[in-house]
Image: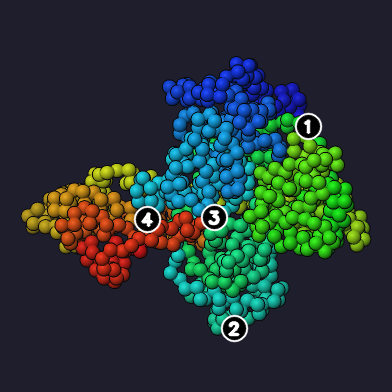
Amino acid sequence: MIGNFLKKMFGTQNERTLDRIRPLVEKIHSLEAGISPLSDDRLAAQIAGFRERAENGEPLEALLPETFAVVREAGKRVLEMRHFDVQMIGGVILHEGRIAEMRTGEGKTLVATLPIVLNALTGRGVHLVTVNDYLAKRDAEWMGRLYRFLGLSVGVIVHGMDDAERQASYRCDITYGTNNEYGFDYLRDNMKFRIEDMVQRELHYAIVDEVDSILIDEARTPLIISGPAEESTGFYAQVNGVIPFLKKEQDYKVDEKARQVLLTEESGIPKLERLLSVDNLYDPRNIEVLHHVNQALKAHVLFHRDVDYMVKDGEVVIVDEFTGRLMPGRRWSDGLHQAVEAKEGVKIENENQTLATITFQNYFRMFEKLAGMTGTADTEAAEFQQIYNLGVTIVPTNQPMVREDRSDQVYRTEREKFQAVLEEVKALHAEGRPVLVGTVSIEKSERLSGLLTRNGIPHNVLNAKHHEREAQIIAEAGHPGRVTIATNMAGRGVDIKLGEGVVGKGGLHIVGTERHESRRVDNQLRGRAGRQGDPGSSRFYLSLEDDLLRIFGSDRIAPIMEKLGMEEGEPIEHPLINKAVENAQKKVEAHNFDIRKHLLEYDDVMNRQRKVIYEMRREVLESDNLREMVLEFAGEVSEDLAGRFCEEKTHPDDWDLPGLSNAAYAQFGIRLDFPEGERASLTPSLVADRIREGAEAFYARKESEYGEDAIRYLEKMFLLSTVDALWKDHLLSMDHLKEGIGLRGYAQKDPLKEYQREGFDLFSDLVIRVKEESLKRLFHVRVQREEEGAEGVAQRLQPQRSRRVSLSRGDIKAAGETTQKRHGAKIGRNDPCPCGSGKKYKKCCGQGA
């Protein structure tokens, strides 16, 4: 009550923000008369002048009106598009680091040019983030004409580019690319061995197109770069062979809300124990068997071909549930992908071990300034504020919205629903109106296509199987009488232009064949019609057999159906039904928010550790002389050794000095000698000083023996390879810790607090081991052929890295390295290491091989 009164008195926050920006738009208008007469060269020269002013310290806010006015004029000349006032407002919101919610069709692609040019004046680079490669290439090409006209360089990052091409694109003033590519480039950069091989520049300013899709929908799964683990894959096929013998309800039960399959105690567990010849499936010794069984059950019961994945060229390829696109190279973790491969009878790849990982939340929070735009953000405004500190401002439309969104029609069965869709499409096709039919999966789109074909209705199908023809299908989708069946691929960012005479017939009609879990995905589909004041209409057809209604809405909707009474083929249209469907979607959205929040809380622990390790790597890469760091490590390890063998509270006669001498030799290659007469006056700090001085003297002798250049190179290589090998093991330990930490709840302990505490202990141990291991290798190294000099040493001790790396959302090939031709004899894994440490090659320099 009071809230409504205050809104009437002072306006909403959104209205106040728009009122604050409108005078700026007026100022931009006032500059138009002076800018319009300028020649093309003079107009482009304006940007060079603004750049100079920005470099001299003038704030971007002061340059905003002039820059926006120049960009608007350039848009008129190059693209034949003049920015509307509402687009100017959107540009200001994006520059301020907020989210602009603009209805679909309001020209967000053009809006982004305003803050992009303004922020590119700093010379620190601007990233534009899109949801797929198609949009990244399209927008970089389309808007690139405007940027190049103004003297700015434009790059694009897409799947399949090599490092040199990526580096060139990142060095441009403006870079277009997808969230996956940016995230993987960040992780790969932090696995490089030379600073000049890194491709990304500083993370200065990013505008995220379709911000709700990238920062919310895709934030449930982290980005992971992984290498093959050594486990055998044979057991997946063995377990896969016994799953078909299990019967639903009798041997296992399915919890579709939680997406879990649970074996029954009376029948399922005993049957599996018999089939797999296992005494007790839940014996700790059989934990691996149980894991394989659970993943195989999930693969058979919860994951469906042409819905969750496709089989293409003998590989299981995941289909993105939000965009409907294939994700080549992305793999499910924890053995699930292998279980699906076994089910489909294709080659089972090795399980992977994580080498590097980050969530989208933590990647995008690293940008100094972040902004976003979408047609559907307001429903998630609280999450944007809470996690990314991004406010949402709703920008008014340029033309009034005239699309007619009709009530949902609900049928009893899917067959009746598809029949109703067929009748509607048939009628509209006869009228000459274009129709876009949205489906939730490849399988459903092909079923509907078969139905239309049998009834003689010509149509196009746009799904992950036909993505090569995407641009052509979209270009024709608005022509008179054209029928297009599409998955979510035809949702975000797709601009369907109406053909001749279509406006007079009522515009494009959208038919939704099922509600998605997220209201935003449904709104995106509706938004393909009625763009920029065009006429259009939309309607969703549902059935009680749809997943959303069956799993989340049945308790509310079924009683309403009974009250209203339903005949076969007869739909129900009622506001109560619409409300119940919306409530079901809200339920799922809240559940998904909890998953994302939970993931972020746990990843925040990893994020702090990741920052420390990556900063340490960067410091090593950027330094030409690590002598000081090595000696600092030596001092810390010396103190640790002294503390371990020489306790402050015990008499020196009781200290284990022979043990200390052996430990110092193992660590630094030096022998300690403490004469009898000195021992009584020794203290732990004196012992630590003695070890440190001995280590420093020994290291100085090594430098003079092998030459400073060789030692400087070895310092860098040994530190980097040790950090990488131990970080990989640490990630595995943290994965294992996270898997079992939930059980602490039974002991009345907070699992997150326990994870933070134990994660800190593991990380402290990692830091100590990095210092000890890298020093051990450095102090024990022996270069056997001195005449080779630094280059020869460098060539032989170049760290070996895993050749095959897989990305959970990207390209396997892009993450690997080119094959190196070996010179000289091959070193066996069990041969003595050529560095002279006395260890086997596999335990020393060949650790990463």
Residue matched to label 1: 400
Instruction: Looking at the image, tell me whether mark 1 or mark 3 is earlier in sequence order.
Output: 1
User: Which kind of residue does numbered mark 1 sit on?
Assistant: Pro
User: Which kind of residue does numbered mark 3 sit on?
Assistant: Arg
Instruction: Looking at the image, tell me whether mark 1 or mark 2 is earlier in sequence order.
Output: 2
Q: CA distance from mark 1 to mark 2?
A: 68 Å
Q: Secondary structure at mark 4?
A: helix
Q: Secondary structure at mark 2?
A: helix
Q: Secondary structure at mark 1?
A: loop
User: Which kind of residue does numbered mark 2 sit on?
Assistant: Arg
Please say if the residues under marks 4 and 2 sit with CB atoms less than 8 Å apart.
no
Q: x, y (%) of residue 323?
A: 65, 52
Most foreground residue, 18 or 478: 478
> Which of the numbered marks, if any, corresponds to residue 724?
4
Q: What is the count of numbered marks? A: 4
Which of discs 1 and 2 lies nearer the camera? The answer is 1
